[in-house]
Image: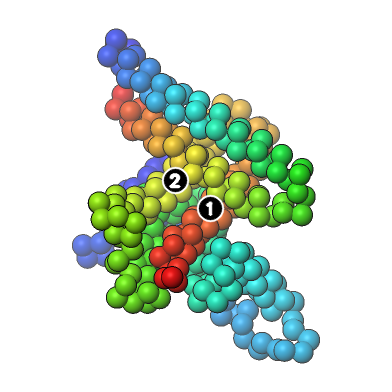
Amino acid sequence: MGMAEAIVALAAALAIGIASIFPAYSQGKVGAAAMESIARQPEAAGDIRTAMILAMALLEALTIYGLLIAFMIIGKI
Amino acid sequence: MSHGGALFEIGPIQVTSVMTTSLAITVILSLIAILGTRNLKVKNPGRGQKALEYIVGGLRDFFAQILGKKRATAFLPVLGTLFLFILFSNYSGLLPGAGKIPGFQPPTGHLGTTVGLAIITFLTVQIGGFKYNGIHYPAHFVKPVFFMLPLLLLEEVIHPLSLSLRLYGNIYGEETVLEKISELIPLLAPIIIMGLSLLFGFIQALVFTMLSSIYIEEATAEEE
């Protein structure tokens, strides 16, 4: 593998790597906050779970964009 | 994974594996709906009727949390169909031979299908907005202040775009991971990923319809 291809491979790894760091951190915060709320108010667990899944889906989309870009870059090798 | 590639052609249209699979899912869902709703009874409903009532009632109650009972009933046909179609096509990727047999490929792992589904959502939101708020619907694009107009117009396009990319990326990524793991460790390890896929397939179908219902809720909200 030449130098150019190695750099392209590294770019793909960075695209998905960096794109997963911060959404993962934020998803952790969302999960923690939701669990805390459920512990405080177990009767509202259903509503909290719905809101949590929604917030997580919005965060996950960011990682998915990174994943798609990584696939596109890998296709170029 | 052999994406694209026409199986055969009808005139100018190239028929791909994704098309045949989504057609098969449509036929299966329609058959369940048609055969299950024959001989409906009020007293002593049969097993099939009870199961279908459970599914439809559960979906309606779920959307009623977001849309309210009246609008949930009005939009249940389109939202429920979207949910069932996405769920079936996500799960079709877990059947043996998916993506390997020609003519059998999970439709939601292909960008064309998800964009199509997102366009349905987009049209539902716009038509619903005009139906519920009439001529005042476009006024909400300039609601708080006038210079919000370009942002709000852009948002209407970004919503379906992110919906389709999210679903496509999830299912396509899952397929790829499953394939790579099966190549690496063919025994037992894919079962764990498949178990996770069962969960994620359901959650993705749920998220797609939940976000759609939230967009519908925003567009059809009563003006004060």
**Residue A70 lies in quadrant:** top left
Q: Are marks 2 and 1 in contact (CB under 8 Å)?
A: yes
Helix, strand, or loop for circle 2? helix
Q: Quadrant of the C terminus of chain B?
A: bottom left
Q: Position of residue B160 (x, y in %)?
A: 37, 54
- In the image, residue A72 sits, relative to residue B170, either above or below, namely above
Q: Position of residue B97 (x, y in %)?
A: 53, 48
Left-right relation of B165 to B34: left
Query: In the rendered image, is residue B204 in sight?
Result: yes
Q: CA distance from mark 2 to mark 1?
A: 10 Å
Which residue in the protein does label 1 denote? B207
Left-right relation of B21 to A72: right
Query: In the rendered image, is residue B16 in sight?
Result: no
Q: Three-letter amino acid code at disc 1?
A: Val
Q: Earlier in the sequence, mark 2 or mark 1?
A: 2
Number of residue marks: 2
Q: Position of residue B3 (x, y in %)?
A: 37, 45
The single residue placed furthest to the top in the displayed view is A3
Q: Three-letter amino acid code at disc 2?
A: Arg
Which residue in the protein does label 2 denote? B166
Of B113 and B23, nearer the camera is B113
Q: Residue at x 59, y 74 (%)?
A: B69
